[in-house]
Image (spheres, rainbow, N blue to C red):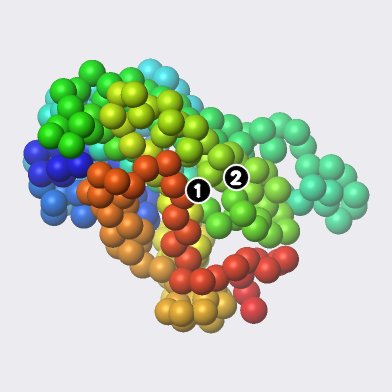
């Protein structure tokens, strides 16, 4: 996909991995809608990056809200790129220490935000992209989802998150097959541990806790390394229907990535 001159949607674009992707896309000549629930950080990023970006407050669970972000992206140019990096709630253990089962509503909320939210963005972005004229490569669009290595090897307390991320991994190939007829590619990145605000601690504290468990490089990932991978998926026309682990060889252990 030719990035220069394309319009892009980055959902969760005010967050750690999303903002890094917005920066890479802008640098490569795209116009970008930063679609996120977080008004303050989203507006700040848009103000910093100037005319090439617009912030649109977006909730992944609302069709109207995602469509409004898509419409804003279409005002900036033909929407050809959609990257979804939105976050969501944490979960809990299947049974807590007193033997009480995890609430079904709690489980469903996590799956809803991460999995249903990702599909909502994917389906609505695809519907918009399908109306584009194909580029020379035959491509009308490219969609990047964000899973997690917890979708393969979730740790204790990640039963809902692991289910949601496993769902994103599972929908990648069928979505790519569905969308092959309209020239839209689909790829998913499954990150390991990346230093972002998602951990709710200072980045130094997060690094000290998680970095040593990573084989090599022996540190957490930088958000720009996620963005680099997203750009590779976007730019390489032969990439389709695949999930890439981006994890510096870490494999979560039973209680998380700490050694
Ligand atoms: N950071 C990591 O180590 C890591 C590892 C594996 C997977 N991931 C996944 O990568 C994605 C991005 O993570 P991050 O570390 O950048 O998180 P982050 O918390 O820095 O950013 C997430 C962003 O999503 C936004 N958001 C939350 N709910 C939303 C909603 N309903 N609609 C729209 N936007 C919403 C938040 O406002 C925030 O700006 C998440 O899906 C996360 O599960 C992250």
Residue 237: x and y, percent? 25, 44
Q: Quadrant of the N terminus?
A: top left
Determine whether the residue tagged by mark 1 lies in a helix, strand or loop.
loop
Residue placed at 68% from the left, 68% from the top?
Answer: 253
Residue placed at 50% from the left, 63% from the top?
Answer: 192
Residue situated in front as seen by the camera: 240 or 230: 240
Residue 197: x and y, percent? 43, 58
| Mark 1 surroundings within 10 Å by alpha-carbon count, few (fewer than 14), some (14 through 19), many (20 or more) | many
Residue placed at 43% from the left, 31% from the top?
Answer: 177
Asked if the residue at label 1 sits under 8 Å from ligand 1, the reply is yes
- Up/down of 70 relative to 234, above or below: above
Q: Is residue 59 left or right of residue 70?
A: right
| Mark 2 surroundings within 10 Å by alpha-carbon count, few (fewer than 14), some (14 through 19), many (20 or more) | many
Residue situated in front as seen by the camera: 212 or 80: 80
Residue 53 visible in rendering: no
Residue 214: x and y, percent? 52, 76
Determine whether the residue tagged by mark 2 lies in a helix, strand or loop.
helix
Q: Quadrant of the C terminus?
A: bottom right
Q: What separation in Å lies between label 2 and label 1 (alpha carbons)?
A: 7 Å
Q: Picture quarter containing residue 52?
A: top left
Residue 17 visible in rendering: yes
Q: Is residue 174 left or right of residue 28?
A: right
Q: How many marks?
A: 2
> Contact (CB < 8 A) between labels 2 and 1?
yes
Q: Picture quarter containing residue 62?
A: top left
Residue 29: x and y, percent? 10, 47
Q: Is residue 38 left or right of residue 210?
A: left
Residue ID for mark 2: 166
Q: Is residue 9 left or right of residue 176?
A: left
Q: Earlier in the sequence, mark 2 or mark 1?
A: 1
Residue 98: image tag:
none
Residue 147: image tag:
1
């Amino acid at each position: 996909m030719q990035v220069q001159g394309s319009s892009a949607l980055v959902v969760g674009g005010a967050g750690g991995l999303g903002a890094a992707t917005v920066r890479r896309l802008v640098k490569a000549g795209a116009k970008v809608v930063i679609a996120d629930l977080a008004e303050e950080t989203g507006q700040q990023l848009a103000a910093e990056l100037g005319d090439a970006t617009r912030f649109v407050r977006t909730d992944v669970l609302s069709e109207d809200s995602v469509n409004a972000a898509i419409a804003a992206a279409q005002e900036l140019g033909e929407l050809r790129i959609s990257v979804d990096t939105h976050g969501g709630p944490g979960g809990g253990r299947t049974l807590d220490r007193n033997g009480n089962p995890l609430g079904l509503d709690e489980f469903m909320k996590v799956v809803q935000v991460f999995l249903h939210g990702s599909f909502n963005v994917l389906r609505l972005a695809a519907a918009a992209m399908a109306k584009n004229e194909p580029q020379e490569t035959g491509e009308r669009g490219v969609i990047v989802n964000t899973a997690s290595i917890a979708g393969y090897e979730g740790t204790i307390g990640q039963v809902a998150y692991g289910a949601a991320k496993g769902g994103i991994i599972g929908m990648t190939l069928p979505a790519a097959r569905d969308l092959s007829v309209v020239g839209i590619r689909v790829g998913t990145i499954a990150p390991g541990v990346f230093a972002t605000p998602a951990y709710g601690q200072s980045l130094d504290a997060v690094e000290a806790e998680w970095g040593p468990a990573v084989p090599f490089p022996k540190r957490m990932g930088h958000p720009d390394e996620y963005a680099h991978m997203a750009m590779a998926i976007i730019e390489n026309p032969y990439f389709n229907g695949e999930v890439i682990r981006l994890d510096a060889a870490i494999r979560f252990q039973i209680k998380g990535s700490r050694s």
